[in-house]
Image: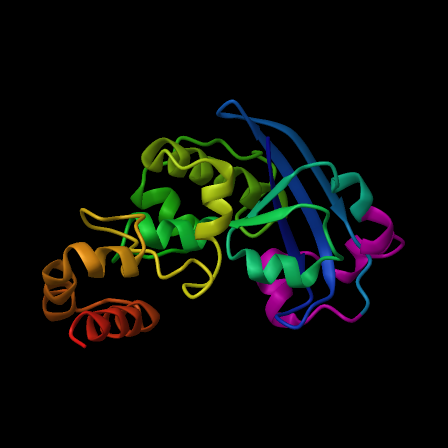
């Protein structure tokens, strides 16, 4: 079971005003939950223009520390740009998976916003009709559909999703695409260095950490 979680905030620096989740079990989206939350600071005008949650809507609501225990209970928490939601929330008892990082590995060269991926991948999802994009529960449905597509496309298990959601260095410099997708740069450098040289010379949009890893491991094969 994966628990997809999303927050809406007072701004980029924090202050949760809404939290929501859905579960993905056997490829199905189930168990929707959502709560408005009293933040620890004023809601910025910029944030309010995006999620349309007002001060009046959160007045009298409990703070995130009171709300969050009912979202516990999963071994895996999934978010789109998980580093942001993880930073906004109190410590969660589980491992984190980032659908944005996984999408970058599977579909290089496209736009990676939640709604952009929904349209470019033609995700089959029906969020709640009374909500809109950038409300937490609405975004959870889209992220859940994206996770289902990632699972279907990649064949990765939960622990592989966790590993691939780490920064490149923590992943052991994993190749995100190509015929050696999912294999470490170090291993490919030993068995097929020519392929890595081809990548360096011909793939213009390599992420800087990956380009650096290719150069590092290729230089070792030439010592």
Residue at the spot 32% in from the left edge and 35% down from the top edge = 153
- Magenta highlight on residue 45: yes
Give the tally of numbered discs. 0
* Left or right of 42 on screen, residue 97: left
Extreme residue in the front direction: 223
Q: Against 42, is 19 above or below? A: above
Q: How is the rendered protein coloured? A: rainbow
Residue at the spot 72% in from the left edge and 50% down from the top edge = 92
* Left or right of 26 on screen, residue 152: left
Q: Which residues are magenta?
A: 41-67
Q: Against 214, is 57 above or below? A: above
Question: Percent x, y for residue 62?
Answer: 87, 52
Which quadrant of the figure has residue 70? top right
Which quadrant of the figure has residue 60? bottom right
Residue at the spot 27% in from the left edge and 74% down from the top edge = 216
Question: Percent x, y for residue 151?
Answer: 41, 34
Q: Check the picture and name the quadrant holding the C terminus.
A: bottom left
Question: Percent x, y for residue 196?
Answer: 16, 62
Residue at the spot 57% in from the left edge and 42% down from the top edge = 140
Foreground residue among 118 and 81: 81
Q: Check the picture and name the quadrant holding the N terminus.
A: top right
Question: Percent x, y for residue 2?
Answer: 58, 35
* Left or right of 56 on screen, residue 152: left
């Amino acid at each position: 079971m994966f628990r997809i979680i999303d927050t809406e905030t007072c701004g980029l620096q924090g202050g949760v005003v809404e939290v929501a989740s859905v579960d993905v079990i056997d490829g199905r989206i189930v168990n929707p939950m959502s709560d408005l939350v009293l933040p620890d600071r004023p809601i910025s005008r910029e944030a309010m223009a995006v999620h349309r949650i007002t001060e009046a809507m959160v007045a009298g609501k409990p703070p995130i520390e009171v709300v969050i225990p009912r979202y516990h209970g999963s071994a895996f928490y999934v978010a789109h740009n998980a580093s942001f939601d993880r930073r906004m929330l109190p410590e969660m008892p589980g491992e984190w998976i980032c659908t944005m990082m996984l999408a970058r590995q599977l579909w290089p060269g496209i736009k990676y916003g939640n709604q952009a991926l929904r349209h470019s991948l033609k995700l089959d999802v029906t969020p709640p009709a009374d909500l809109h994009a950038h409300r937490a529960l609405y975004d959870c449905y889209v992220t859940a559909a994206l996770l289902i597509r990632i699972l279907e496309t990649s064949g990765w298990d939960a622990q592989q999703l966790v590993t691939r959601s780490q920064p490149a260095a923590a992943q052991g410099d994993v190749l995100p695409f190509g015929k050696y997708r999912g294999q470490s740069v170090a291993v490919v450098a030993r068995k097929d260095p020519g392929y890595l040289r081809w990548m360096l010379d011909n793939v213009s949009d390599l992420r800087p950490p990956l380009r650096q890893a290719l150069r590092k491991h290729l230089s070792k094969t030439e010592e």
